[in-house]
Structures are given as C-alpha cells and as structure tokens.
Amino acid sequence: MRLSKRTAAFTGADAKMPKLKTKSGAKKRFKITATGKIKAGVAGKRHRLISHSAKYIRQQRGTKVMDASDAKIIRHFLPYGL
C-alpha cells in the first residue's frame, strides 16, 4: 500500500526537524571569524563623544571579539553560522 504525501506527514515516514530561523538582528550585528569566534562593533560610538577622551574614542574604533559568555548566547541566534 502506497501512502500519499499527506498521510506520510502524519505517520512520520519522512519526518524531519524543522529548520531553525536566524535572528535577523543578530545577522546584521555579528560576524563569525575563521577560527569560530564572534566579532561585533564596539558600543559607545554614536553620540556624546565630546565628553569622552581621545584615547577612549581611539580604542573604540573598529570591531572587538566577543567574550566567551556572550558568544555562547549569540550562537543560539545564529544556528547555521553566517
């Protein structure tokens, strides 16, 4: 007896786990390096820079590698990497 596609779905004949969605906010903000670390842009560079020292502004330039505890959370948002 041959099962139709609809019947097969209910019996679990070709049952697969559903695909996981990537958080759209995370894919815009984070990148994964070749070694698997997560990098992100630094915070505190948008406004109110006049009150910060030149050293602070200079050190906040570019991107930073996320701490391991934060990276663990971010990996849940990016199930398949980027």
Image: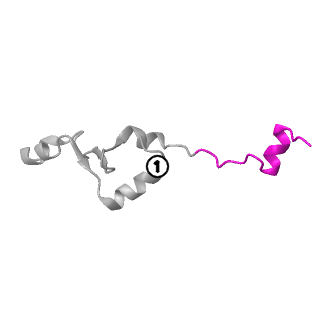
- Asked if the stretch drawn in magenta spans residue 31, the answer is no
Residue at the front extreme? Answer: 1
Highlighted range, magenta: 1-19
Residue at image x 31%, y 51%? 37
Residue 45 seen? yes
Tell me residue 9's x, y (percent): 79, 45
Q: Residue 50 placed where, x, y %?
A: 13, 41
Q: Tell me which amino acid carries mark 1.
A: Phe
Q: Position of residue 8 (x, y in %)?
A: 81, 44
**Colouring mode (rainbow / by chain / secondary structure / one colour):** one colour
Q: Which residue is mark 1?
A: 77
- Which quarter of the rendering shows the N terminus? top right
On the image, the x and y values in percent for residue 44 come to 23, 46
In this orientation, does residue 44 appear?
Answer: no
Q: Residue furthest left?
A: 54
**71 to 42, vertically: above or below:** below
**Identity of the residue drawn at 42% across and 57% down:** 73
Write down the quadrant of residue 3 in the picture.
top right
Residues packed near mark 1 inside 10 Å, few (<14), some (14 to 19) or many (20 plus):
some
In the rendered structure, the answer to whether residue 54 lies left or right of residue 44 reads: left
Task: Check if residue 4 falls in the magenta segment.
Answer: yes
Kindly state the secondary structure of the residue where label 1 is placed: helix
